[in-house]
Amino acid sequence: MASLGQIIFWGMIVMIFVAAGFIILILSVSFAVQGLGGSQGTVDSNNKWPIVNLGEDVILSCKFKTSTNSGESTSQVSITWKKKGLSEVVYSYNKGAVQLTEQNPQFKDRTQLFSDAIGGGNASMLLRNVKIKDEGVYYCSVNAPSCSGTASVNLRVAAFSAPKLKWVNTTLTAEGERWFPKPDVLWLDVNDNVLNESETSFFNNSAGITRFISSLQKITLNDSYTCIIQNHLVKAVSRATVKDIEISTRTFFSFPTAAAPPILLPQRHVLAATTSLFLWIYQLT
């Protein structure tokens, strides 16, 4: 006959497996519904934090799972795009027909879906001529025979342009025509050391777009310099090489990615909880 200690031991083993299964279930649900864009069900977005240059077009990504390999009948699919804080819709598509009677005037003649791709699970929306007030969280809701759910996309709007660099005597000047939000400007030498011999002036227009002129003094011929222009949305790195009679430049843009929100039960906490259970069982036995 098993002793009391053995009964307790095996009982705790069963509890560990039950607890582990429960934790895995919680993590699965957490990953499914707490994704970066807050997607639900089988509706999701490939790009949940897009950054668009002011005045350009952007595609807000949204996809959904179809019931067959051949796709979904568009006459059975409903797609609604909304923007957080607005009561009217951004775009509405219901069973093969576009319905814009309740569209917010802000988006008139600036939105469309890709009708030929809806049957294949593409509910993405094209937004033309993006304005600063377009920034915000958008919700893509899909109702189809194969699935029903919502994905969110956080659109961020910036203004950025490659600076114009010119060299006069011993001064290298960078001029940025349009930046938003207001950027910081930094100069580096060929060894990436910060150069303090620079002056930067900023000018804002009525729309809040910033223009800047930054001058670096005491440069030397046949040497390379880097001008870094950045805000929290965009970083531009312009490298300039000053030669005897000319200047060669290259500009690269990069965009930060948003960090994922905290998971409901981080893995380290799960491991710590499991370790504690094992220690407790060991003490009992």
Image: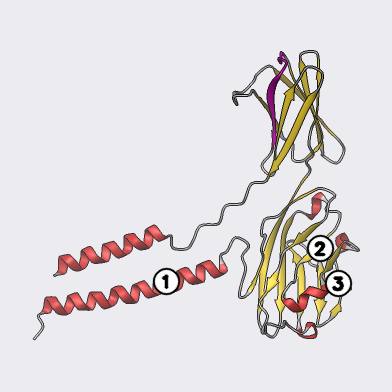
> Which numbered disc flags the more N-terminal residue, 2 or 3?
3
Out of 252 and 256, give the one closest to the viewer. Answer: 252
Q: Mark 3 is on which residue type?
A: Glu
Q: How is the image coloured?
A: secondary structure
For the residue labelled by badge 3, is the local secondary structure a helix, a strand or a loop? loop
User: Could you tell me how far apart the alpha carbons at marks 1 and 3 are, in whole angstroms?
Assistant: 43 Å
Quarter of the image for the N terminus: give it: bottom left
User: Could you tell me how far apart the alpha carbons at marks 2 and 3 are, in whole angstroms?
Assistant: 18 Å
Q: Determine which residue is flagged by label 3.
A: 102
The local crowd at label 2, few if under 14, some if 14 to 19, many if 20 or more residues have their Cα within 10 Å, is some
The quadrant holding residue 282 is bottom left
Residue 126 tag number: 2
> Which numbered disc flags the more N-terminal residue, 1 or 2?
1
* Segment colored magenta: 218-230
User: Could you tell me how far apart the alpha carbons at marks 1 and 2 are, in whole angstroms?
Assistant: 38 Å
Residue 24 tag number: 1
The quadrant holding residue 68 is bottom right
Q: Is residue 229 above or below residue 88?
A: above
Taking the spot 13% from the left edge, 70% from the top edge, the residue there is 285
Q: Position of residue 15 (x, y in %)?
A: 28, 76
Asked if the magenta segment contains residue 54, the reply would be: no
Q: Position of residue 252 (x, y in %)?
A: 71, 39
Residue 281 tag number: none
Out of 227 and 1, give the one closest to the viewer. Answer: 227
For the residue labelled by badge 1, is the local secondary structure a helix, a strand or a loop? helix
Taking the spot 87% from the left edge, 72% from the top edge, the residue there is 100
Q: Position of residue 260 (x, y in %)?
A: 56, 56
How would you classify the magenta stretch by its main secondary structure?
strand
> Which numbered disc flags the more N-terminal residue, 1 or 3?
1
Q: Mark 1 is on which residue type?
A: Ile
Could you tell whether 224 is left or right of 207 in the image? Answer: left
